[in-house]
Amino acid sequence: MKKLLLLLCAGLSGAAFAANGVSVTFHLNYPDAGTLAPVTVSAGNALPLAAKPHPEREGFRFGGWYTSAECLPSEEWLFGTNSVGFYTQPTDSMAVEADMDLYAKWIAPTPVRTAEDLDAMRQDLKGWYVLENDIDLSGIANWDPVGRYEAHYEFAPGEWWTQAFQGCLDGKGHTIRGLSLTQLLTDKSGLFGACANCEIRDVNMEGTRIVLTAERPYVGPLAGILKQDDGCQAVIRRCHVTGTRLEVKTTNSEGTFHSFTGLCGGAWGGLIEDCTATGSMDLDLCGAGGGELYVGPFLGEAYNDTVGCESDFDIRIRFSTPAANGLKAFIGGLQASATHVVSCTAKGRIEVSGNPGSPEIYIGGLVGSERYGSVEDCGSAVEIVETGLPSVQVGGIIGEFNQSYGMIGAAFGTKATELLRCAFTGRIRLDGAGTEVFGEINGGGKPEPLSSPWGISMDYKITDCRYDPQR
């Protein structure tokens, strides 16, 4: 889904500072707090995301900048530009035409004690919510995710994800039980649909059931998609999602993207730290062409940091009808794709079968597709079983080094994509009907360094990794 390509454009979208321009003053907006240093910007231009201050106040959460001290929802001032396409074409921006004042909004915590309280989070997507007890959602046949994803969000900063959850949920170690998704009300679905520059911490989820037929979902018990802007923080920390059951039938076609996980459907930036995911998944994929499929216990399509996480999932995927050339499937014991993964472990089972025609299928005991960055101090004890597939690439730690995304990482300054101190102690059984590629630690072995006529380059390294499968 070209997620990282949009970042190349985002860097071009902000207005540059000008020595002689209009001035914006930031009022902290509580007693005796004063103001921050003003910012000067060229008249008629938007305030760039890099210019947005993120102040702190004890006992409160910062909720954005507004044009009056009352901080009414209609008065919020958004930074940067909501753009579309690979070349920044503004569709929405807030131009500063004259000297102006902005006021900080401060949010106090709101207690959440019932299913109704949890549902009410959608009424203030910037709120700070604190669970005060366990909550049972089993009486709700189909949960409506908190926070929506809009089609134009793919090329917009999280600042402009105005229908997404941008607040904080502090679970205090309490458990949300029995969430059920049986019909998609939004393409990105879970407890939360879309989340941008938010914090979800210390939330346990137990017994989630996702049983549906869908065409283009990003689905996970906790969230459909996580987005982080530069200079902001999007965090899922110390969340434990156990006993999840996914039973999904989906149809692929040209240009469709599917992501099925046990935690979060995808992450475009952000940090997932000290979390666990356990459960099972049965996925039936049919259709006649193209698209991409992401499957993993933690994350699907991911360009983020995953640190100190553990998974134990039983995944079964069947391609029930032949798919036309062009389908790409990324399947991992921890997550489907990745940039940075540190100190994580995976166990469980991945079984893939059927007749998908001539797709590209990449299976890794930890990560299906490593885009760029590093996988460090990780281990996989996953059992991988493949039967009947005409073409597949399998590795104990990663299925592939993806060189197309690697070039994007190189353009951002990544000098090497590395596997460091990783070990595979699981089991791999391949019984395909055609071409199988197997490379122990990485399915395709170590690629040659990337280079381009424009001077962009990146090396690949596999260091101190161990392949010691069960017999």
Image (cartoon, rainbow, N blue to C red):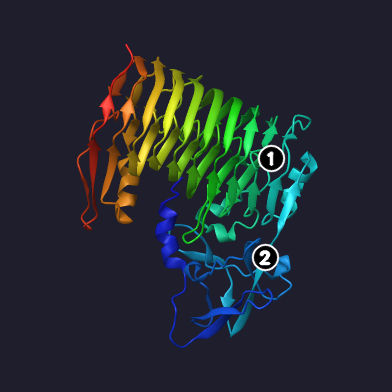
Q: Which residue lies furthest to the top in this view?
A: 471
Residue occupying image coordinates x 72% and y 65% = 73
Q: Residue furthest bottom?
A: 20
Residue 224 is drawn in which quadrant? top right
Q: Nearer the viewer, mark 2 or mark 1?
A: 2
Percent coordinates x, y for residue 176 in the rendering: 69, 35
Percent coordinates x, y for residue 369 in the rendering: 37, 36
Q: Is residue 12 visible?
A: yes
Question: Number of numbered discs present?
Answer: 2
Residue 308 is drawn in which quadrant? top left
Percent coordinates x, y for residue 127 in the rendering: 69, 55
Residue occupying image coordinates x 41% and y 53% = 5
Frontmost residue, 326 versus 309: 309
Percent coordinates x, y for residue 40 in the rendering: 50, 82
Frontmost residue, 35 versus 323: 35
Residue at numbered disc 2: 106
- How far is mark 2 from mark 1, CA to CA? 31 Å
Q: Can residue 439 be seen in this view?
A: no
Q: On the rendered structure, is 42 left or right of 219?
A: left
Q: Are marks 2 and 1 in contact (CB under 8 Å)?
A: no
In the rendered image, the vertical position of residue 132 relative to residue 457, given as above or below: above
Check disc 1 and report its element: helix, strand or loop: loop
Residue 263 badge: none
Which amino acid, by three-letter code, is at mark 2?
Trp
Residue occupying image coordinates x 67% and y 65% = 106
In the rendered image, the vertical position of residue 6 relative to residue 381, given as above or below: below
Residue at numbered disc 1: 185
Residue occupying image coordinates x 46% and y 60% = 230
